[in-house]
Amino acid sequence: MQLQTISDIYEANSQIRRKLCETVGGLSPEQLNALPEGEKWSISDIVEHVSIVNGGMFRICSKLLSKAEADGKMSDGQIDLSSFMEKTAGAAEMKLEAPEMVRPKGGQALDASLAALDEGEKSFQTLVPAFDKYDGNAAKFPHPYFGDLSAIEWLVLAGGHEARHLRQIRRILEKIG
């Protein structure tokens, strides 16, 4: 899917979320908690991590859009992902270490993580009017690996982060059979 509008980004993120929920929804406790060789996190841990990160990404987007509003930066409807694509090229193959504050604590039930993901999606929906009205390209906030990102780039990254971990979950499922 070409990401040319905020609506495109939201739709892509929604599709990724559906696939993630479908993939983990029917798994047994054994599958959810398996830790195959070479993996640091179980599937349950991964979903917990994604829910933690999404909450942080929502807060970042919200703050950046509030800054654009305070600065009077109005949206012209354009989204600029060119530098973001350059910054994140090859990230899917990179081994990235999650900062301590977004690592799973373990032991959280899948239902709780999925409920947090659902709440996060609802929170992101509340930002649609702000993305439509204010310039989501204007203000930036640093990502630990990709440098300064705009609210629009953080929104795209939210979906990309889920897609990355969906691939990881699928690899784990292949390992455990």
Image (cartoon, helix red, strand yellow):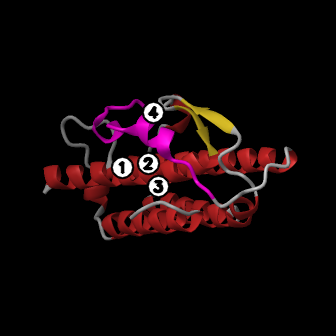
Q: How much space separates mark 3 and mark 1, taking CA atoms?
A: 10 Å
Q: Amino acid at mark 4?
A: Ala
Residue 88 is a magenta residue: yes
* Secondary element type, mark 3: helix
Q: Amino acid at mark 1?
A: His
The reply to whether residue 69 is in sight is yes
Discs 1/2, front: 2
Q: Name the disc covering residue 161, or none.
A: 2
Label 3 with label 2: CB-CB less than 8 Å: yes
Q: Give the extent of the magenta segment.
A: 78-98
Q: How much space separates mark 4 and mark 3, taking CA atoms?
A: 16 Å
Q: Quadrant of the N terminus?
A: bottom left
Q: Amino acid at mark 2?
A: His
Along the line of sight, the residue nearer the viewer: 43 or 63: 63
> Of callouts 2 and 4, which one flags the residue occurring earlier in the amino acid sequence?
4
State left or right for residue 88 relative to residue 27.
Answer: right
User: Residue beneath label 3, please?
Assistant: 159
User: Residue beneath label 1, please?
Assistant: 165
